[in-house]
Image (tube, rainbow, N blue to C red):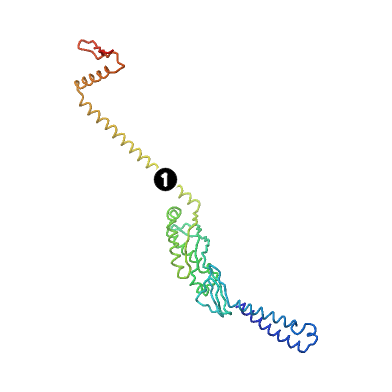
């Protein structure tokens, strides 16, 4: 619109200056002798104004939408609900085109929230979002180009605070943070999608608890870990005791079985077998075997010694 108005003004000025220059030359011999018939200052300025005006008028008939943006067209203040995609496009000279980014954008969010026990925690999170291209004209009409603080930020604070009130501080500090994160992302997606905002991520960066409460939670976790360790030690000792009992029972059973099967005849036979093996050894010179019936030992010497 601005280029169109300037071009029209320049064209009008050029026409006026050119017409005025011709009238002055027709009645002023000094101008003709000084500048010539085609070189009066008014006519030169008029031609220049006409040339610039035509160039600006042609430029006002086209618009370039940069990559990652859409254009919202307004004509005399009225918003057209069809956005212009990226690229070069022709347009009505007196139409205005407003650029709106459809790229991913990230915002850091900090807030104070209450838990189910009434403890206040400090929450730092991020929001990664982008604008739905077809909804750009509606957002421009109702909110404007700076739509984040009006359209997005209040939903983040309200949603996150409502969800955090259903968790106790210990759960937020330990295992339930991932569940909180998923619930916040899902809720923001449902709430902002109809408004033209696509939520891609809403990660919780940090949750700060009061120092005394955090220390108490850490001490409780350490005590639970120590209890688990002692339980493991006790179980290991019980298993070791059971192993030793089973081993002792096995030894006792073995000894009982062996003792019931031993007789004097069996022992004498085993002794004779052992004596024979000793006598056949290459290192044996003679063998002394127990005592005989007369109380004297029996000496056995192999024939080859």
Residue situated in front as seen by the camera: 229 or 215: 229
Instruction: Tell me if 28 is positioned left or right of 73 in this view.
Output: right
| Residue underneath mark 1 | 225
Vertical order, 305 against 124 (above or below) = above
Q: How many marks?
A: 1
Q: Residue at x 58, y 78 (%)?
A: 61
Give percent across and percent down for residue 59. Answer: 61, 76
Give percent across and percent down for residue 67. Answer: 54, 68
Q: Tell me the SS state at disc 1.
A: helix
Instruction: Tell me if 229 is positioned left or right of 21 in this view.
Output: left
Give percent across and percent down for residue 11. Answer: 66, 82
Q: Which quadrant of the structure image shows residue 20?
A: bottom right
Vertical order, 254 against 224 (above or below) = above
Q: Residue at x 55, y 75 (%)?
A: 89
Which quarter shows the N terminus? bottom right
Farthest bottom residue in view: 27
Residue situated in front as seen by the camera: 27 or 265: 27
Give percent across and percent down for residue 153. Answer: 51, 65
Which quarter shows the C terminus? top left
Vertical order, 153 against 79 (above or below) = above
> Dot 1, crowdedness within 10 Å: few (<14), some or many (≥20)?
few
Residue situated in front as seen by the camera: 131 or 71: 71
């Amino acid at each position: 619109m601005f280029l169109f108005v300037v071009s029209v003004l320049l064209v009008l000025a050029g026409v006026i200056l050119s017409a005025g220059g011709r009238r002055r030359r027709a009645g002023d011999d000094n101008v003709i002798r000084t500048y010539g018939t085609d070189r009066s200052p008014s006519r030169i300025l008029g031609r220049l104004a006409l040339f610039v005006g035509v160039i600006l008028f042609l430029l006002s008939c086209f618009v370039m939408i940069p990559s990652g943006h859409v254009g919202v067209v307004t004509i005399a203040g009225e918003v057209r609900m069809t956005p212009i995609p990226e690229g070069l496009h022709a347009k009505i000279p007196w139409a205005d085109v407003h650029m709106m980014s459809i790229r991913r954008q990230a915002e850091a969010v900090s807030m104070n929230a209450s838990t189910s026990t009434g403890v206040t925690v400090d929450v730092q999170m991020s929001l990664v979002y982008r604008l739905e291209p077809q909804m750009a004209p509606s957002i421009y009409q109702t909110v404007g180009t700076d739509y984040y603080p009006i359209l997005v930020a209040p939903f983040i604070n309200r949603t996150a605070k409502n969800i955090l009130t259903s968790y106790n501080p210990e759960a937020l500090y330990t295992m339930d943070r991932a569940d909180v994160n998923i619930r916040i992302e899902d809720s923001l997606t449902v709430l902002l999608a109809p408004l033209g905002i696509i939520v891609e991520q809403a990660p919780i960066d940090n949750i700060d608890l009061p120092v005394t409460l955090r220390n108490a939670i850490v001490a409780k976790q350490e005590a639970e870990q120590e209890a688990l360790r002692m339980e493991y030690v006790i179980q290991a000792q019980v298993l070791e005791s059971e192993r030793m009992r089973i081993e002792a029972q096995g030894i006792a059973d073995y000894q009982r079985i062996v003792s019931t099967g031993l007789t004097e005849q069996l022992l004498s036979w085993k002794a004779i077998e052992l004596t024979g093996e000793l006598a056949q050894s290459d290192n044996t010179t003679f063998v002394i075997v127990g005592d005989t019936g007369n109380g004297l030992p029996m000496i056995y010497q192999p024939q080859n010694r």
